Structures are given as structure tokens and as C-alpha cells.
Amino acid sequence: MGMLAKSRESSGDNRKSSSSIGARPSRSRSSSRHINKSKVPCVDHFTVVEPKISTEGVHEWAFDDSFPIDVLYMTGYGGQQVRMNRHGYFEVLYLCSGSAECRIQDRLLPIKQGDLVVIGSALYHRIECRSSSPARIAALFFEPDLIRCDGGSDSAEYLTPFLLQDSDFPHIIPAETGIPSEVLDLMMRIRAELPVTSTRARLAARTYLKMLLLLLVNQYAPYAGMFETFQRQQCALDRLRPLFRYISENCEDPIQVRKAARICAMSESHFMSFFKQVTGSSFMKYLNHCRVARAQALLANTDEPLTSIGQRAGFCSQSYFGFVFRKAVGTTPALYRRRFRSPRLEGSERIHDVPQLLAG
């Protein structure tokens, strides 16, 4: 988070000059042109997200405990694919440039430039970049308790678009509706107040967030969701938690589908369909991703030889380890170690200046 804080401080003057509250789409376009003239710090999507995904497939974000909200800009590349994951926080993404797809469970949703993506906490998902040039994304992360705990009797209603997401939920809000540009404008305003250093900044950031959420509530008002949808998703995840713990503790051992089904007290056929429905991935593919994550941690933090790392991560042979790792990460284990531990990638070098972040 220190890296992002420095980025905010260095570009604070530019962000503070955003236009007034209550902007309509035309104002948002004006704000975008202003951003386009400045240099916006942009972090690598894979480097920021992938290392923070647990064996259970839960992504953790290091929020400021006193005010758990963050706005950042990420660059995604086609050769790198983050694992399917979910998270306790809520997420709003705006595609600034390039093209991408959002894989949510077993759905693949195309995202065009200027579109908005709304993602809750229960569904496994990932963003897949498809363009030859990098896709650039503005991201808002926030803990729902930031809204739930503000004392208002109607606070929870602001969160309904995130809580009522089922298998048919329309996660993508097209640019043509005008909503994404308004949301982006409010995201910029929130970012201009971070990190919060005063009561006024806290009030302003919370107000902008509520304005943003109200736009989403109005957008999704016609959607006939039910709170039971969220409860069903949580119950499904609870059935898999013993297996997630077992994988975390025994990743290096052979784990067959039969064993996994037995841990979850299901037949093999029911387990395979249930696991795919809940996580959006087949069990063996999910297990391989967990093993790749174990290997990534060992490559980045130890000097162990590659053969030893492959064995400790649970791969039966060095060639299979290399094949699965390259398919998941987009590079070989040796190149990953050199890239991750290279001095040039430390500190501010992981942030790229992106003058044309919101071009077009």
C-alpha cells in the first residue's frame, strides 16, 4: 500500500482539480480529458492481484483499516492470467482502454472500452485481457462495512447490486448508458481524497461513494434479484471449505477427485458439477492453479532448485510442472524467478506512467 500511497501523493495536485459534485456524463468526459493530460500511475494487474490469492481462491487487499477503500489503475497483458478468485470486498472496474473479458463462474462476458463491471463477494471471477496492446483498468475496491457501519438505517440498501448477484446477473454496464462515465468521475473524486487525513476528506470520500452506489442501485432497480441468492452462494462455499483447508495443508500430495469428493461428503459426479458451479473451474484445474501459486511463492522467496520447487508444489514431474506453470502464468518458472527478483522490479519501478490512460 505504501507504493500506492506514494503514487497518490505525487499526483495529488492533478486529482484535486476534478470538477464539481453531481457531474453528468458530459462533465465526466471533461474530467477524462483532464486526466489524459497528466501522468497517471498504473500498477501491473497480475503482480498486484495474483500473489494475494489464497489456496481457497480468496483475494486479500491491504486496506487502510480506518477507512477500507482504494482506487487504483492497473495494466493487464494478454500473456498473464490471474487465477479465478473471489473476495470479501466489493469491486467496480472501468475499462479505460484496450479490450478484455470478465470470466465469472462459467460465464465469459466481453468488456468494451468505457464499460463498467460490478462484482460482489461470492462469485469466483477474473479479468482476461484480450488485446495485443495492454488493457488499462480503473478499479474501485471497498469493504461493505464502510457503508453498513455508517449509522444510517438504509445503509444496506446501497449495497443491493452487490448482494443480489446470481448466475444471470448483468455485471457489465455498457458505456452507452452514460452510467460508467459518471461512476468513473466519482471514482476519481474518491481517489483525490485518499489516503484520508482529515474529517472533511473522510466525509467527502464517503459521500462520493454513496453517490456512486446510488447510481448502481438505480441502474439495477429493474433487476429481480432476491437476498436468498446471496445466502445460497454462501452455503455452497461452506460445503467446500473443508476441501480448501485440506488443499492448503496437503498441496504437495496427490489429491484425486475421489478423495476431494469424500472430503465434501458427495459422490464424484455430483462433486465435479458442484465444484464447477461454485468456483467456475474444474477441480483439477483449480488444484493446479493452487500448486502454481505455491510454486510462485517458493520461486520468489527461496533459492531452492526448480526440481525441488516442482515437487514441493505437488507436480509429479519437472516437465509437467513447467507445462502447467507456463500455461497459467505466461512464462517459465526460471524466467518468473528472474523477473520477480530482479532489482529493477522493486519499489517504484513496478509503477508505470501512463499518459494516455483514458484516451478515446
Image (cartoon, rainbow, N blue to C red):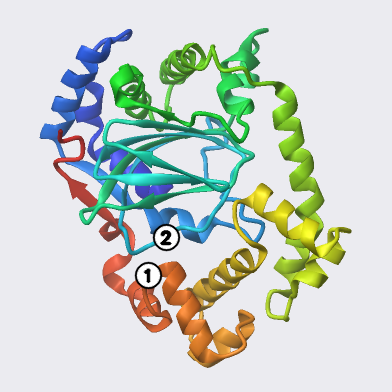
Which amino acid lies under the numbered mark 1 shown in the image of this protein?
Gly
Question: Which mark is first along the chain, 2 or 1?
Answer: 2
How far from the left and from the top, in percent, is residue 271?
77, 58
Q: Secondary structure at mark 2?
A: loop
User: At 62% across and 40% down in the image, what residue appears?
Assistant: 88
Label 1 to label 2: alpha-carbon separation: 7 Å
Residue ID for mark 1:
330
In the displayed structure image, the side of residue 299 where residue 9 appears, left or right: left
| Location of residue 189 with respect to 61 vertically, above or below | above
Q: Residues within 10 Å of mark 1 (few under 14, many from 20)?
A: some
Residue 81 numbered tag: 2
Q: Nearer the viewer, residue 268 or 88?
A: 268
How far from the left and from the top, in percent, is residue 35?
18, 30
Kindly indicate the quadrant of the structure image that contains residue 330. Answer: bottom left
In the displayed structure image, the side of residue 156 where residue 307 appears, left or right: left
Q: Secondary structure at mark 1?
A: loop
| Location of residue 324 with respect to 18 vertically, above or below | below
In the displayed structure image, the side of residue 83 where residue 274 appears, left or right: right
Kindly indicate the quadrant of the structure image that contains residue 291. Answer: bottom right
Q: Are marks 1 and 2 in contact (CB under 8 Å)?
A: yes
User: At 21% across and 13% down in the image, what residue appears?
Assistant: 27
